[in-house]
């Protein structure tokens, strides 16, 4: 028995939601293809994603490389333009005031004051950056090597006109460095990125996201480039900052062991779509989708002598290209469950499964559950 189909319903605590979000990238055509009038093809990086994030959530986006996690995060922040769908966000009062002073009135999309992010013209996006920020995977690549830590942190303040004087900006930079535990701040301010360890660099990356006092942060694989020994420290820091500054995170990771540790809700993505969604504890303890089950099977387990053992993933073949997405359930060419349930074949290969609620707030898109 299912409890009904998934529907994004914003409430008083919702800070962000997306509905049927799509981000497609055009594939370049060769001259021959253009001359032969071959239709344009698309990389369907995000292909109809819906979910809601409440204030204070650490909402996980998980799934294999190429499933569309980063593109989802970047689209939400309007670093990439969506192809279609709704991105709704509840801004602070002061953001609305800033837009009003610019003679811009954002489109309100529900009774809770969420606004339509997708329709904001480029020239009005700047104030939004103060509220919605991103932490990048590669702290080295995302920090300009020619800037000192001080300049890297002062730059966003200057761009957004925060801090009346250099002294005031200095204080903000020093406080932010303290918040990310780079203390004493004077010791770090005048170093260049190459003079920092990987963990320290990521702390600067976090400080750069934090310095504009945001309320919503997309953290894209923030610890995957770091040494295993310092991952826990950075995750602890992110949780501490969340409590201190009332942050909400979307936490992107291909590593379910990390997601399990930090997120309270999780969406499992496969080829641009969410296949399972729910409280992290429920999804990890009771995975329903054959793909989620396979991912959880693949989490390394400690062996007696403390070596990590990678277990085999019960999936067939490789991830298909996001240009040629399989018909029906997009996971069907790799699904071992389908082999055991030939009666499902007609459904699985032809019709996309709806996302249904199987237990409270635990949703899955698989015909195994949707047909009952
Ligand atoms: N700017 C772009 N132009 C064309 N295709 C893109 C672009 N950005 C991403 N893609 C494609 O979109 C799909 C999703 O990519 P994305 O980076 O969102 O995946 P991901 O889940 O973050 O993967 P990873 O775990 O490797 O970071 C991939 O097929 C990728 O090649
Ligand atoms: S819908 Fe069918 S093919 Fe897709 S995961 Fe479920 S059983 Fe496998
Ligand atoms: Mg990515």
Image (tube, helix red, strand yellow):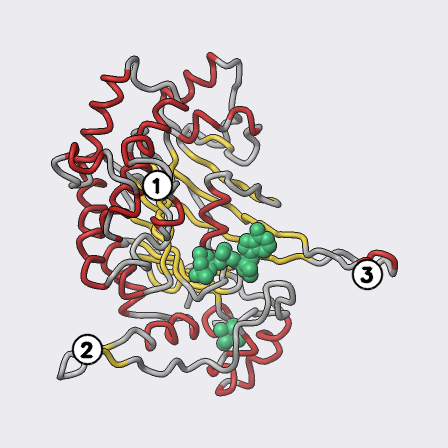
Q: Mark 3 points at which residue?
A: 33
Report the mark closest to the observer, 3 or 1: 3
Judge by depth and name the residue closer to the eye, 337 or 357.
337
The x and y percentages for residue 160 are: 39, 22
**What x and y, as percent, mark residue 98?**
42, 17
Residue at image coords 24%, 17% = 168
Q: Mark 1 points at which residue?
A: 217
**Left or right of 17 in this view: 60:** left
Label 2, label 3: how many angstroms apart (C-alpha)? 52 Å
* Residue 253 shows in the view: yes
Of helix, strand and loop, which one carries label 1?
Answer: strand
Task: Give the residue pinned by disc 2.
Answer: 302
Question: Does mark 1's beta carbon lie closer than 8 Å to ligand 3?
Answer: no
Judge whether 124 appears above or below 200 on screen.
Answer: above
What residue lies at 32% left-to-right and 52% top-to-bottom? 222
User: As displayed, is residue 269 above or below residue 131?
Assistant: below
**Residue placed at 39% from the left, 70% from the top?**
292
Q: Distance between the residues labelled 2 and 1?
A: 32 Å
Binning the other alpha carbons within 10 Å of mark 3 as few (below 14), some (14 to 19) or many (20 upward) gives few
Marks 3 & 1, CB-CB < 8 Å contact: no
Under circle 2, the secondary element is strand
In the rendered structure, which disc, 3 or 1, sits on the residue that comes first in sequence? 3
The part of the image, by quadrant, that contains residue 191 is: top left
Q: Are marks 2 and 3 in contact (CB under 8 Å)?
A: no
């Amino acid at each position: 028995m299912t409890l009904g189909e998934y529907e994004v319903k914003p409430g008083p605590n919702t800070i962000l939601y997306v509905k049927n979000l799509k981000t497609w990238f055009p594939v370049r055509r060769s001259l021959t293809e253009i001359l032969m009038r071959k239709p344009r093809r698309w990389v369907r990086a995000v292909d109809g994603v819906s979910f809601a994030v409440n204030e204070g959530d650490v909402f996980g986006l998980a799934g294999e490389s190429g499933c569309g996690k980063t593109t989802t995060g970047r689209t939400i922040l309007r670093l990439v333009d969506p192809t279609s769908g709704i991105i709704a966000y509840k801004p602070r009062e002061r953001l609305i005031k800033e837009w009003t002073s610019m003679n811009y009135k954002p489109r309100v999309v529900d009774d809770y004051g969420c606004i339509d992010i997708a329709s904001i013209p480029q020239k009005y996006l700047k104030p939004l950056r103060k509220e919605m920020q991103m932490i990048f995977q590669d702290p080295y690549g995302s920090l300009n090597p020619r800037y000192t830590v001080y300049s890297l942190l002062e730059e966003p303040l200057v761009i957004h006109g925060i801090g009346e004087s250099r002294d005031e900006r200095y204080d903000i930079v020093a406080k932010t460095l303290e918040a990310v535990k780079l203390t004493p701040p004077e010791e770090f301010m005048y170093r260049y990125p190459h003079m920092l360890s990987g963990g320290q660099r990521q702390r600067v990356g976090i400080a750069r996201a934090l310095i504009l006092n945001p309320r919503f942060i997309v953290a894209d694989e923030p610890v995957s480039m770091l040494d295993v020994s310092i991952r826990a420290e950075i995750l602890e820091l992110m949780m501490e900052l969340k409590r201190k500054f009332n942050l909400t995170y979307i936490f992107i990771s291909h590593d379910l062991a990390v997601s399990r540790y930090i997120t309270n809700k999780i969406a499992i993505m496969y080829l641009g779509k969410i296949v399972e969604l729910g409280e992290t504890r429920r999804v990890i303890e009771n995975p329903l989708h054959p793909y989620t089950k396979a991912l959880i099977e693949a989490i390394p387990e400690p062996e007696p002598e403390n070596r990590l053992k990678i277990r085999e993933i019960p999936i067939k073949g490789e991830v298909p290209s996001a240009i040629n997405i399989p018909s029906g359930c997009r996971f069907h060419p790799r699904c071992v469950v389908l082999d055991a349930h030939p009666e499902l074949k007609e459904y699985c290969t032809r019709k996309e499964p709806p996302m249904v609620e199987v237990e409270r707030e635990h949703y899955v898109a698989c015909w195994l559950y949707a047909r009952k």
